[in-house]
Amino acid sequence: MTAPLVESRLPLPMLRRGKVREVYEVDRDALLMVASDRVSAFDVVLSEPVPHKGAVLTQLSAFWFRKLAGVLPHHLLTAAPDEIVARVPVLAEHREAIAGRAMLVQRTTPVPFECVVRGYVIGSSWKDYQETGAICGIRLPAGLLQAARLPEPIFTPASKAEAGDHDENISFEEAQARTEALLAPDLAGTSKSGAQLVGEARDAALRLYSEASNYAATRGIIIADTKFEFGIDAAGTLHLIDEALTPDSSRFWPASQYREGISPPSFDKQYVRDYLETLDWNKRAPGPELPVEVVEATAAKYREAHQRLTGQPLA
């Protein structure tokens, strides 16, 4: 069994280190994204890695990028280690370290907000609905139960938080204003405005969620909600980037155990969150240590999500 990867160190310039991923510069056209086995909860990176988590995130994202390519272009160039090494020879001695957990991707300019799509009333949206009868300001029918399916999926953009900070829901209008302000130079040579780009991102996110949900249903999984990230190329064309429909970015439920009125079990780090909720912890760094059984159970859930959705064992 490969040892968990807490932090990658490769002979390339590092562009940024996130809660889970390291992003390296390859050249003016490409980046290398490496998914570690770090796990975060409540926006705090915990000290114990979850074995094979990074491989699940990478291989499941690659699966979805290919499957949904007919809906929207994506930034994936290759996730095959031999192809990565052929393109970036300096990584030859690090092939085993990146195998299965690295993606070579096209550079894009990120859209400055996360595109969240919610299909069910759960988590923070359930709390919001109980208090206001709405989710992120979107009015919903009265009397919905916890985990109820929404009449139709809704789009709720969120700010991108720095490591250690919390993402915050923002209005559609605020997303437009941010995009106009931050991407004005990048859109100057295109026919699009920031407002148009946000509308395009909303429509793409809803289409991607619909296609993915329909497929996942055939594999016995409900996608309760998910978040997408988009980027634009020099022509202003929208691309699906970062990760897609993984246990880190989505809430997956086994359809066989779903019912309204309860919080269904899920194939993600909810097992970690549930354990942490039993502790006297202020949800600030440093996080508490995770017992071995919690780490192992979480790893098993990630692997099962990959197996169910792809029909293939984790490489």
Image (cartoon, rainbow, N blue to C red):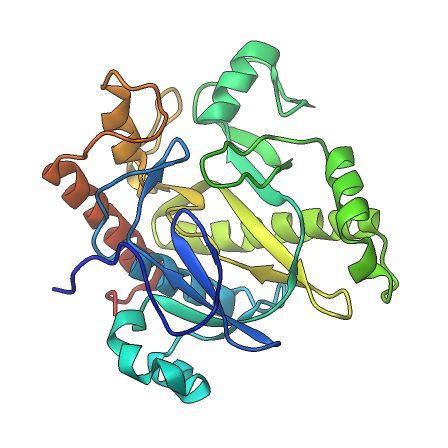
Q: Is residue 65 left or right of residue 182?
A: left
In-front residue for pair 46/254:
46
**Above/below status of 2 relative to 126:** below
In-front residue for pair 291/90:
90
Quadrant of the image containing the N terminus:
bottom left
Determine the image quadrant of residue 53.
bottom left
In-front residue for pair 69/279:
279
Quadrant of the image containing the C terminus:
bottom left
**Above/below status of 276 relative to 72:** above
Q: Does any portion of residue 145 appear in the rendered image?
A: yes
Query: How far across and how far down the image is residue 170, in percent?
Result: 67, 31
Q: Which residue is drawn at 34% across and 49% down?
A: 220
In-front residue for pair 143/133:
133
Query: How far across and how far down the image is residue 286, in percent?
Result: 30, 31
The extreme top residue here reads 131
**Above/below status of 48 relative to 10:** above
Q: Does any portion of residue 144 appear in the rendered image?
A: no
Q: Which residue is drawn at 27% across and 54% down?
A: 6
Q: Residue at x 54, y 64 (%)?
A: 68
- How many marks can you see? 0
Query: How far across and how far down the image is residue 274, in percent?
Result: 27, 27
Determine the image quadrant of residue 173.
top right
Q: In this view, does 110 lie to the left or right of 278?
A: right
